[in-house]
Structure formats: C-alpha cells, structure tokens
Amino acid sequence: MTGANILFVVIGAVALIGGLVLLIAALRHHRANHPTGVAMLIGGMMVTAFGLMLAGFAIAYTMAAPLGAMEPAR
C-alpha cells in the first residue's frame, strides 16, 4: 500500500469510529421527536457510512489489478 492509500484507510477508520460514537450517543439519549437527537442519529449514520466507504474503496483500489494488465477479449 502506498502512503496515500494508508492515509485514506486511516481517515476512513477514524470517521467510522467517530460516526459510531455519535450514533451510540444519540441512541442512548434519544427522546421522541427531539430535533437534536434526530440530527445526531442522521449525522452518525452518514459519517459511519462515509468512513466505511472511504476505507473500503481505498483497500479495494490497492487490491485490484492494474487496468492495463487485462487483455481484451477476442
């Protein structure tokens, strides 16, 4: 893995953990129809998904074969 890929994986992992912490905090202090709790739930889910996608695509990019290595089908 290159330095840039490691950086993306680290940023994604930090965002994933931060989103999960926000999501758990929102679930613990959730009150029905309270705007702050609802915003924390939505934000936590969005940050968690962003971190998972960022780290996942960085790992997939590292593991994929180069584009020029594939021969065209005849």
Image: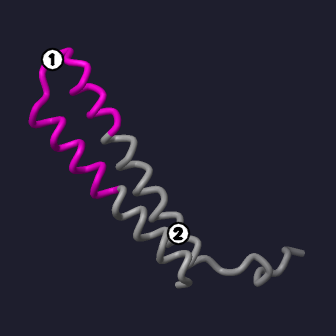
- Hey, which quadrant is residue 40 in on the image? top left
Residue at the left extreme of this rendering: 28
x 28%, y 58%: residue: 17
x 47%, y 56%: residue: 53
**Element on which disc 1 rests:** loop
x 80%, y 80%: residue: 68
Above or below for 72 versus 43: below
**Element on which disc 2 rests:** helix
Q: Relative to the observer, which residue lies in front, 26 or 67? A: 26
Q: Give the mark nearest the N terminus, 1 or 2.
A: 1
Q: Residue 72: x, y in percent?
A: 85, 75
Query: Gap between marks 1 and 2, in whole Å?
Result: 38 Å
Q: Relative to the observer, which residue lies in front, 74 or 43? A: 43
Q: Relative to the observer, which residue lies in front, 64 or 22? A: 22
Give the amino acid type for the residue marked by disc 1 in the picture.
Ala
Residue 31 part of the magenta segment: yes
Assess whether mark 2 and mark 1 are in contact (beta carbons under 8 angstroms). no
Q: Residue 46: x, y in percent?
A: 39, 41
Q: Residue 50: x, y in percent?
A: 44, 50
Give the amino acid type for the residue marked by disc 2 in the picture.
Ala
- Secondary structure mostly seen in magenta is helix
Q: Quadrant of the C terminus?
A: bottom right
- Hey, which quadrant is residue 36 in on the image? top left
| Residue behind mark 1 | 32
Residue at the front extreme of this rendering: 36
**Left or right placement of residue 51 versus residue 31 in this view:** right
Above or below for 56 versus 46: below
Badge 1 density bin: few <14, some 14–19, many ≥20, Cα 10 Å: few
| Residue behind mark 2 | 58
| Segment colored magenta | 16-43
**Left or right placement of residue 65 versus residue 59 in this view:** right
Badge 2 density bin: few <14, some 14–19, many ≥20, Cα 10 Å: many
